[in-house]
Amino acid sequence: MLDSTEVYHTEEQQDNYAEKASVLNQIEELETKILKRKKWSYMWGSMFVGSIFFPILNSIFLLDFKIPFWIVSFGFILSICGLIYVLDQDKTDNKTRREFIVKLQVIENLIFSEEISNATQEERAVKQLNKSQLDLDNYYQLNISHVSKIFNLGKTIVLFGTFIIVGTIILMFFKPKMVNDIILICSLIGGALVDFIGAIFISMYSKIIKSANLSQYGMLETTQAYLGNVLASQIQDDKLREDTLSELAKSLIKKEKNINFND
């Protein structure tokens, strides 16, 4: 027969697992919503690019297919409004997703605390090590995902700026009557500025990589501390085990990190 304390822990664990499942379902629904809206962002982006480049290509190559100017203008304005709406909704949903993730982490920590509350010292140390390794791997995967987005954005901006410069030069050679000095200078300067902005994003990418590596280094130290705790917990002699844990704690406190954050 279970005592009242054991019943309380069991009911609390069940509530935590139910709440965890609910949060996971909410995150999954939110991800599905974001994925559907991403398809709309592709449509608005295509409409935006088409409304800009179709009149330019039509004037250069004198295409037979004509679209009234008011339709092009309407498509441009509509695409701008659509992109603004999508970006605003993405910002709101990303904030909601972060809140769900924080809530999920709190619930998982509560579940973990319940799981190790009645475990032996060695079992507790092993579970703490496994959890630390899992957190380290999750952080690593999340870091790679965010950093790759920044790098891809910088690369896209650089390619767009290069396209402006190359397009201006081609237009200057094949349609010199359409290009005056002001358009030529503005296009070259605009392309150079876009490339400069892209280079800034790529520079941010390298700095974020360094900052993420420092954070990962700190998490790795925590994992190593848990590993030391696991090894110490396997010592059978109580006094020797306590002395070992004490020395381990002292070494972690006294350890200095000679890392220059400004390099």
Image (cartoon, rainbow, N blue to C red):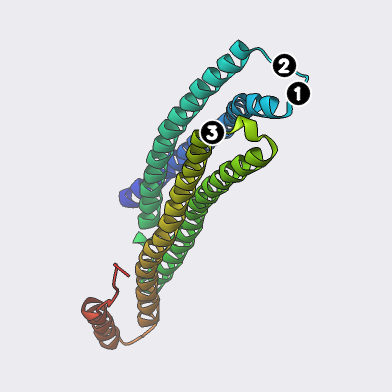
Task: Describe the element under mark 1 as helix, strand or loop.
Answer: loop
Q: Nearer the viewer, residue 11 or 211?
A: 211
Vertical placement of residue 255 versus 188, above or below: below
Vertical placement of residue 197 versus 36, above or below: below
Vertical placement of residue 219 versus 68, above or below: below
Q: Quadrant of residue 39?
A: top right
Q: Tell us which disc is closer to us: 3 or 1.
A: 1
Crowd band around label 1 with a 10 angstrom C-alpha radius: few (<14), some (14–19), many (20+): few
Return the x and y of residue 236 as percentages of the image width and height.
Answer: 36, 85
User: Do labels 1 and 2 touch, CB within 8 Å?
Assistant: yes
Residue at 55% across, 23% down: 79
Vertical placement of residue 132 versus 193, above or below: below
* Pointer 3 or 1: first along the chain: 3
Residue at 58% across, 30% down: 45
Q: Tell us which disc is closer to us: 3 or 2.
A: 2
Task: Describe the element under mark 3 as helix, strand or loop.
Answer: helix
Q: Quadrant of residue 54?
A: top right
Crowd band around label 2 with a 10 angstrom C-alpha radius: few (<14), some (14–19), many (20+): few
Residue beneath label 3, please?
Answer: 34
Q: Amino acid at mark 1?
A: Leu
Q: Amino acid at mark 3?
A: Ile
Q: Is residue 143 visible?
A: yes
Residue at 55% across, 30% down: 33
Residue beneath label 2, please?
Answer: 66
Q: Amino acid at mark 2?
A: Lys
Q: Is residue 151 left or right of residue 226?
A: right
Return the x and y of residue 185 as percentages of the image width and height.
Answer: 49, 40
Residue beneath label 1, please?
Answer: 63
